[in-house]
Image (spheres, rainbow, N blue to C red):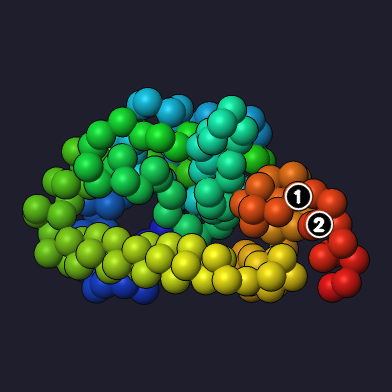
């Protein structure tokens, strides 16, 4: 839990009461490679902190799986739109490796926000960071070459190409596996 507390402390102040509340409300879980923690049509009832492992969010477009994001150590993950609105998710979340996660329910998340101003500050900072990150990344992808997209991916997710199947990376970048192979050979 030390790593979770460290990541939260990078966005807000932690005092003993908040630390105790975090320890009481986050639950440690172990998942296996291939486990799905959210399916399309379900409501995202939890936010997770990745202690160990890699997961991805994805959706289906014309019966084809499209990777929307990768998450690894020290990241918070959920289907963001579904979690914040508590509506059904269009995304799924799957473990790409064995994972160690801390999970926090939506209700406990709201409880911490309402009762701990420093946690409310953390939640605001996390939402702002995710919004800015996703907005900047997605808009930049429209105008980049395949080579630029791949290099940006490696910049955001160092070592991801060693941990994730290349087909998922190609899906995420919006390019074919053949194009990805050519791009990788030039790097």
Is residue 70 in view?
yes
Between 176 and 51, the residue placed more toward the observer is 176
Q: Which mark is residue 179?
A: 2
Between 25 and 76, the residue placed more toward the observer is 76
Q: SS class of the residue under badge 1?
A: loop
Q: Which residue is the extreme one toward the left? A: 115
Q: Which residue is the extreme one toward the right? A: 185
Q: Quadrant of the N terminus?
A: bottom left
Q: SS class of the residue under badge 2?
A: helix
Query: What residue sits 37% from the left and 26% below the top?
Result: 41
Is 159 on the left or on the right of 1, as rendered?
Answer: right
Query: What residue sits 56% from the left and 66% below the top?
Result: 141
In percent of width and height, residue 184 lies at 84, 64
Relative vertical location of residue 141 with respect to residue 101 in this rendering, above or below: below
In percent of width and height, residue 148 lies at 68, 73
In percent of width and height, residue 129 lies at 35, 68
Is 147 on the left or on the right of 41, as rendered?
Answer: right
Q: Which mark is residue 176?
A: 1
Cα distance between the residues tagged 2 and 1? 5 Å
Query: What residue sits 25% from the left and 46% below the top?
Result: 84
In percent of width and height, residue 151 lies at 70, 72
Between 171 and 109, the residue placed more toward the observer is 171
Relative vertical location of residue 33 with respect to residue 155 in this rendering, above or below: above
Is residue 24 in view?
no
Mark 2 near mark 1, Cβ–Cβ under 8 Å? Answer: yes
- Number of residues whose C-alpha sits closer than 10 Å to that of mark 2, classed few (under 14), some (14–19) or many (20 or more): few
Q: Quadrant of residue 14?
A: bottom left
């Amino acid at each position: 839990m030390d790593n979770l507390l460290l990541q939260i402390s990078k966005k807000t102040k932690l005092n003993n009461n908040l630390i105790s509340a975090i320890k009481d409300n986050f639950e440690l879980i172990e998942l296996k490679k291939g486990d799905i923690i959210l399916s399309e049509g379900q409501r995202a009832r939890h936010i997770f902190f990745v202690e160990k492992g890699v997961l991805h969010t994805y959706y289906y477009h014309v019966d084809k799986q499209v990777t929307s994001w990768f998450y690894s150590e020290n990241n918070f993950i959920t289907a963001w739109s579904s979690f914040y609105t508590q509506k059904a998710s269009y995304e799924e979340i799957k473990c790409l490796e064995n994972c160690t996660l801390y999970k926090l329910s939506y209700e406990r998340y709201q409880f911490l926000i309402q009762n701990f101003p420093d946690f409310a500050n953390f939640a605001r900072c996390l939402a702002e960071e995710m919004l800015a990150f996703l907005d900047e990344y997605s808009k930049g992808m429209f105008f980049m070459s395949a080579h630029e997209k791949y290099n940006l991916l490696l910049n955001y997710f160092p070592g991801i190409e060693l941990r994730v199947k290349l087909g998922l990376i190609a899906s995420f970048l919006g390019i074919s596996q053949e194009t990805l192979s050519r791009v990788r050979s030039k790097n």
